[in-house]
């Protein structure tokens, strides 16, 4: 249970760090790129014994590289979404992406459809709209693209990770994640060199902090899954629900982010959707 608590705490802390990076005027992309080098090297050190077997299969390396591109792109938009719209919106956009693998499973794998799944998916869509809506702003302009990109991109990542976990790297989750991080870090370094940007000293600090916490969020959820205390079908909704709740509490308490009645309803719908898809959609 301690690993689940640490997973929730580190994932919530990620969104706090996103806000801090914005307030400290740290270069977002540089911090994100450095974050992936830090997380990747931490993982490589921890799971180094699995490298020979993992790299023996070319499919693993190809998948890691492709996922690295997705990771750094979506992570950057997560940072921007949190800075522009607030911690609660960032966490909801990210965690509501749990509906995407569900829709894909129904569409591509002929997974049975029931009323709970339909309700959960509809609630997720409504919650994403309501949490992004701000009083006094035109909704179509305010929602913009950032939260939508995070929602769709995170869902795509979850879908591919689910496929990879069962088809490609079932016994190598740790080193697989580390290689994804390193691929993202390499891509980020290439982009920084191409743009000939001067590296900020505070981006190094921000990336170091962000990378350590980011690695922890992945490592602790893997440890939770391996502990066999609860099944994955229970762990993920509990984890996501807790992160949304904790992020909302932190945003309101420490960053004084104002939530309208519609925003509150959106968060409640998000919680209901995660609970329904996690606990009530079977059968």
Image: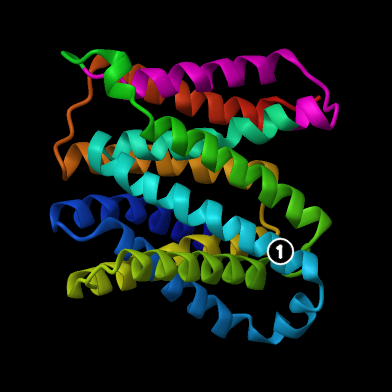
The answer to whether residue 275 is left or right of residue 101 is left
Residue farthest to the right? 110
Residue drawn where x is 45% and y is 61% of the image: 6
Count of numbered circles on the image: 1
In front: 237, or 28?
Answer: 28
Place of residue 20 in the rendered image (x, y in percent of width and height, measured from the top left):
20, 55
Q: Give the image quarter of residue 280.
A: top right
Q: Determine whether 257 is above or below 54 in the image.
A: above
Q: Determine whether 128 is above or below 245 in the image.
A: above
Color style of the picture: rainbow
Place of residue 118 in the rendered image (x, y in percent of width and height, measured from the top left):
66, 15
Q: Is residue 77 magenta?
A: no
In front: 195, or 130?
Answer: 195
Residue drawn where x is 68% and y is 47% of the image: 160
Q: Give the image quarter of residue 248.
A: top left
Place of residue 57 in the rendered image (x, y in percent of width and height, measured from the top left):
81, 72
Q: Which residue is mark 1?
A: 62
Q: Determine whether 161 is above or below 263 in the image.
A: below
Locate the N terminus and report the quarter of the image it occupies. bottom right
Q: Is residue 133 magenta?
A: yes
Q: Is residue 1 visible?
A: no
Q: Which residues are magenta?
A: 105-134
Q: Is residue 34 visible?
A: yes
The answer to whether residue 246 is left or right of residue 68 is left
Q: Determine whether 234 is above or below 164 in the image.
A: above
Place of residue 178 in the rendered image (x, y in percent of width and height, measured from the top left):
58, 71
């Amino acid at each position: 249970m301690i690993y689940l608590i640490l997973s929730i705490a580190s994932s919530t802390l990620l969104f706090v760090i996103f806000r801090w990076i914005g307030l400290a005027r740290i270069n977002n992309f540089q911090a994100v790129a450095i974050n992936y080098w830090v997380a990747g090297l931490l993982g490589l050190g921890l799971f180094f014994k699995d490298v020979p077997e993992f790299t023996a299969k070319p499919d693993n390396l190809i998948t890691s590289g492709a996922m690295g591109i997705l990771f750094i792109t979506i992570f950057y938009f997560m940072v921007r979404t949190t800075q522009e719209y607030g911690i609660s919106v960032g966490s909801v956009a990210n965690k509501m992406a749990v509906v995407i693998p569900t829709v894909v499973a129904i569409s591509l794998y002929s997974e049975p459809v029931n009323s709970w799944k339909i309700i959960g998916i509809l609630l997720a869509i409504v919650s994403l709209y309501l949490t992004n809506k701000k009083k006094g702003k035109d909704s179509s302009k305010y929602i913009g693209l950032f939260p939508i990109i995070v929602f769709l991109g995170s869902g795509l990542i979850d879908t591919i990770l689910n496929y990879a976990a069962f088809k490609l790297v079932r016994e190598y989750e740790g080193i697989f994640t580390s290689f994804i991080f390193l691929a993202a870090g390499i891509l980020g370094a290439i982009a920084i060199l191409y743009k000939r940007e001067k590296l900020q000293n505070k981006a190094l600090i921000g990336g170091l902090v962000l990378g350590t916490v980011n690695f922890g969020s992945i490592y602790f959820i893997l440890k939770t899954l391996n502990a066999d205390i609860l099944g994955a079908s229970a762990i993920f909704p509990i984890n996501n629900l807790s992160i949304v709740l904790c992020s909302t509490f932190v945003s309101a308490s420490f960053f004084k982010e104002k939530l309208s009645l519609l925003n509150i309803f959106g968060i409640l719908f998000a919680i209901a959707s995660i609970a329904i898809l996690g606990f009530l959609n079977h059968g």
